Image: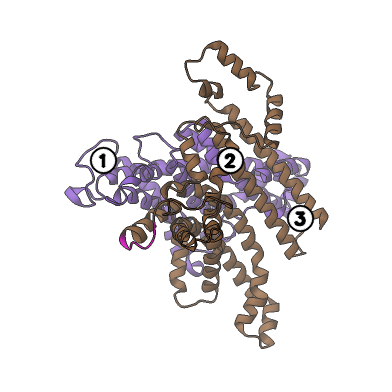
Chain colours: A purple, B brown
């Protein structure tokens, strides 16, 4: 392999458990449940937002708790809690779309490479390795900045750099599975390559794909927030956690909560993602 | 050895070539028309056609790409629409500030990562707190660390400065461009000390994420290596735990941590773009964020090429170093 096995990224695979000592099943289930909680908050956001996140509803720069605004108001009097909930929702959608597209494209490339082997495998994996050797966040910023800031462009930019990682891992899993007796039996029974791939190899790779994706949620959310911070997300006045911090930096020293609260929301979301990802890994076995 | 190095360098050349192709393709896919950006919206049709011809934009794509590559080899990255300077000159102006910050952050990340790994492996007192730091650190966006640092160490305690690289208006500008070095070279240690103070907050904000990743990888290989037979043998010979750790365990655990460090540099480059904004750090990051809103594509492309090629080069060096350190690695 020309691009070198040592260059294979260890983005989150190589990390040890966060939860102490592996944890019990119940603890892992509770941790994995944080994914459900995050989703619930994202989907119910429009219902639980106390005010319209885009319109001024009170006096500007109110501190948290003042006049009934739990997290205060921003520089033009919009409710920060409502904006954080709306931002949570859009971050959730962005993460879901990027992971789904990464799994789809990476899974397809990995499945084809792993099932066919030989020259197909070689060509596909060389392409994958080349993409993996480039700094993903920098390329994502370049793509989003070139296409012009918009939500779709950001998702496209991150999606472009996110699939090779999945392709590598799924291909590895498929190659391992291909050596198993049940696959050989199917081959002897006359199963074609496509049937072999879809029916006998793909299902076995699903748990690995799920674990990889779950462990990835935290770092994906941070990458997306970074792009949003640089102004490469939805345009104003849309509520976005990264952008809400960046645009309000000038208030940091007088009204710290205006830039800090959206940043803390990113942290809570990524923390939920990381803990839940570890829970999923513990439940599905260490892969 | 020569074969290994040439193989790695060959791979590096291919990857950088792909990088230029990606950047070139982006330029073509961009909705911003370089001719209109240069001449303004009111340019006549003839002027536009003339400029298009002068830039070679009326030629077929492969030949445009060829011209792009030959220009790159002559360090010609085009002109910035915003500053109206050659991109190469702009990058040379802003690179030292970024390089100083990134180097400082890298050293911090290595020190913190190692401390984190060793402390949790040996279960020092307070290692439980460090475990929490690991989880939280992996989940905190760098910009939040940055503004938190400003609130605590600048506003509340008044210990550290929060903006820029220096408090001196007459700080030396050469010869290296790294203020900490230039201060010493100019015989002005107060400039160096002040520059160090300015580096602490942005450096920490950049370093904590990578430190956590490096620390985790190092920790897992430390724990793994401590269970090996050769460590048991060394302990059985009566060597002290510290000596076994230093001479046997750490040495064999460095490989994965080194790989992780190489990869984290990519994240750090992206982090620099964000962090420089928060601290008004006059480097590549600020240059980029001023270029993004005005669609200054040549500038963005130049930064991407610089950071991308730097990342690929660093990881190639890491790979070669690893093969040198551990002959079992087959490249």
**Tag 3 residue:** B331
Q: Secondary structure at mark 2?
A: helix
Q: What distance separates the C-alpha of mark 3 from that of mark 1? A: 57 Å
Of marks 2 and 3, the one in the foreground:
2
A112 left or right of A279 in image: right
**What stretch of residues is rendered in magenta?**
B156-161
Residue placed most toward the observer, A192 or A107: A107
**Tag 1 residue:** A78
**Labelled disc at residue B304:** 2
Instruction: Give the residue displayed 26% in from the left and 37% down from the top.
Output: A52
| Disc 2 crowd, CA 10 A, few/some/many (<14, 14-19, 20+) | many
3 and 1 marks on the same chain: no
Chain for disc number 1: A
Q: Secondary structure at mark 1?
A: loop
| Disc 1 crowd, CA 10 A, few/some/many (<14, 14-19, 20+) | many
Q: Pinpoint residue A97: horizontal percent, then vertical percent.
A: 49, 40
B299 left or right of A174 in image: left
Is residue B287 depicted above or below B192 in this figure?
above
Instruction: Give the residue displayed 59% in from the left and 45% down from the top.
Output: B307
B286 left or right of A184 in image: left
Chain for disc number 2: B
Q: Are marks 3 and 1 in contact (CB under 8 Å)?
A: no
Q: Pinpoint residue B145: horizontal percent, then vertical percent.
A: 41, 56
Of marks 2 and 1, the one in the foreground:
2
Q: Secondary structure at mark 3?
A: loop
């Amino acid at each position: 392999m020309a691009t070198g096995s040592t260059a294979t990224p260890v983005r989150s695979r190589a990390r040890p458990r966060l939860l102490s000592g592996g944890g019990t099943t119940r603890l892992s289930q509770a941790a994995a449940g944080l994914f459900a909680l995050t989703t619930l908050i994202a989907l119910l956001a429009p219902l639980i937002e106390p005010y319209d996140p885009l319109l001024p509803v009170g006096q500007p720069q109110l501190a948290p708790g003042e006049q009934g605004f739990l997290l205060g108001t921003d520089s033009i009097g919009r409710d920060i809690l409502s904006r954080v909930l709306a931002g949570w929702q859009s971050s959730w959608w962005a993460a879901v779309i990027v992971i789904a597209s990464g799994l789809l494209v990476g899974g397809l490339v990995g499945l084809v490479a792993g099932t066919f082997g030989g020259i197909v495998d070689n060509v596909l994996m060389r392409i994958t390795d080349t993409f993996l050797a480039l700094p993903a966040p920098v390329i994502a910023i370049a793509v989003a900045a070139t296409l012009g800031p918009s939500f779709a462009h950001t998702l496209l930019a991150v999606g472009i750099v996110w699939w090779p990682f999945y392709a590598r891992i799924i291909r590895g899993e498929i190659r391992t599975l291909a050596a198993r007796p049940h696959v050989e039996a199917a081959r002897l029974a006359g199963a074609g390559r496509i049937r072999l791939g879809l029916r006998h190899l793909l299902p076995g790779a699903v748990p690995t794909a799920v674990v990889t994706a779950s462990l990835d949620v935290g770092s994906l959310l941070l990458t997306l927030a970074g792009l949003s911070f640089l102004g490469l997300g939805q345009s104003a006045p849309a509520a976005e956690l990264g952008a809400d911090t960046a645009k309000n930096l000038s208030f940091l020293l007088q009204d710290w909560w205006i830039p800090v609260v959206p940043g803390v929301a990113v942290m809570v979301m990524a923390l939920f993602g990381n803990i839940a990802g570890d829970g999923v890994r513990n439940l599905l076995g260490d892969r | 050895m020569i074969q290994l190095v040439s193989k790695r360098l060959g791979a590096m050349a291919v990857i950088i070539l792909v990088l230029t192709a990606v950047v070139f393709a982006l330029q073509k896919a961009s909705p911003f028309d370089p001719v209109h950006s240069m001449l303004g919206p009111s340019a006549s049709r003839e002027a536009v056609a003339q400029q298009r011809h002068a830039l070679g934009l009326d030629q077929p794509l492969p030949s445009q790409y060829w011209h792009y590559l030959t220009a790159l080899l002559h360090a010609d990255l085009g002109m910035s629409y915003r500053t109206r300077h050659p991109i190469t000159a702009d990058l040379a102006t802003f690179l030292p500030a970024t390089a100083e910050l990134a180097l400082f952050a890298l050293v911090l990340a290595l020190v913190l990562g190692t401390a984190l790994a060793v402390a949790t492996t040996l279960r020092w007192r307070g290692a439980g707190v460090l475990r929490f730091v690991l989880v939280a650190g992996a989940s905190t966006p760098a910009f939040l660390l940055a503004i938190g640092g400003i609130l605590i160490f600048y506003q509340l305690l008044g210990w550290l400065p929060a903006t820029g690289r220096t408090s001196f208006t007459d700080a030396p500008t050469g010869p290296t461009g790294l203020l900490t070095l230039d201060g010493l070279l100019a015989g002005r240690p107060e400039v160096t000390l002040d520059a160090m103070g300015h580096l602490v907050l942005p450096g920490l904000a950049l370093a904590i994420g990578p430190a956590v990743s490096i620390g985790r990888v190092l920790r897992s290989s430390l724990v793994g290596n401590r269970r090996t037979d050769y460590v048991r043998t060394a302990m059985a010979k009566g060597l002290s735990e510290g000596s076994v750790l230093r001479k046997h365990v750490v040495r064999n655990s460095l490989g994965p941590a080194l790989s992780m460090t190489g990869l984290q540099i990519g994240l750090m480059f992206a982090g620099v773009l964000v962090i420089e904004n928060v601290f008004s750090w006059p480097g590549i990051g600020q240059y980029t964020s001023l270029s993004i809103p005005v669609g200054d594509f040549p500038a963005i492309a130049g930064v991407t090429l610089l950071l991308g090629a730097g990342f690929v080069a660093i990881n190639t060096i890491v790979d070669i170093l690893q093969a040198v350190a551990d002959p079992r690695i087959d490249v």
